[in-house]
Image (cartoon, helix red, strand yellow):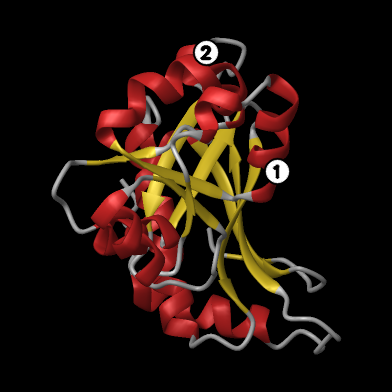
Amino acid sequence: MIEIETEEIVETVEKALESKDRRFTESVDLCINLKNVDLKQPKNRLNLDVILPNSFREPKIGVFASGEMALKAKEAGAEVIDPEELKRMDKRSAKGMVKRYDLFAADAALMPQIGRSLGTVLGPRGKMPVPIPPGTDPGPILERLRRTVSIRSKAPTFWVSVGRKGMDARAIAENAVAVIKAVESHLERGWQNIASIYVKTTMGHAVRVV
């Protein structure tokens, strides 16, 4: 059994970060290649949300809420969507709204209504809202969302962003370890189903981890 720890990946990340600087901030991505996994079987496909230890992005989050929860969601940096919009929304406007936001959260009491109105649009895109229990401060939930990366893989090779160039190499390595361990734990044969792992910046060369 292979155990990947942060110390082992820091040097690999540092090598990847040595790539030539570009005119934009490159992402740092993890490439995982699987083997001996029958991905034609839906049960074998990866469908994971991994909470990273270190934030590196600012996704646009839409929150279905009203009253005090809406005010706190705004204070936490999210955009509030008036629940009344659900009553007026057709499929075209729903698709437009889905494109405007990277992630969604919602007052848990609104989830049945959201499911009826938007389930067919949000569901296939993996964007169903994260429910916020009544009386709960949405701030910590939204912060976890910002640190969450989704893995939806139907192919043996997939990419996951774990940082941005300019971040500390150790912080990126910690994120990479979190993703690798989550993937390994969901594979039927664990490490025996992983062929190789690489780290690279958007325009840089891939550096092998294992």
Residue 177 shows which numbered tag? none
Q: Position of residue 203 (x, y in %)?
A: 82, 71
Classify 10 Å Cα crowding around label 1: few (below 14), some (14-19), many (20 and above). few
Q: CA distance from mark 1 to mark 2?
A: 26 Å
Residue type of the residue flagged with mark 2? Pro
Q: Name above or below for residue 26 compared with residue 38.
A: below
How many badges with numbers are in the image?
A: 2
Circle 1: element type: helix
Any part of residue 4 in sight: no
* Badge 2: residue crowd in 10 Å (few <14, some 14–19, many ≥20): few
- Can you say whether 192 is above or below 74 in the image? above
Can residue 74 be seen here? The reply is yes
Q: Amino acid at mark 1?
A: Lys
User: Which residue lies at the image location 36% right of the left edge and 78% below the top edge?
Assistant: 7
What residue do we see at 48% from left, 75% from top?
172
* Residue topped by disc 2: 42
Return the residue found at the far top: 41
The quarter of the displayed image where residue 76 is located: bottom left
Q: Which residue does the numbered mark 1 point to in the structure image?
A: 99
Give the mark nearer the N terminus: 1 vs 2.
2
Q: In percent of the image, x 71 and y 31: which residue is there?
A: 93
| Image: 175 above or below 7 | above
The reply, left or right, for residue 73 in relation to residue 117 is left
> For numbered disc 2, what is the local secondary structure?
helix
Q: Position of residue 129 (x, y in %)?
A: 42, 37
Left or right of 72: which side holds 134?
A: left
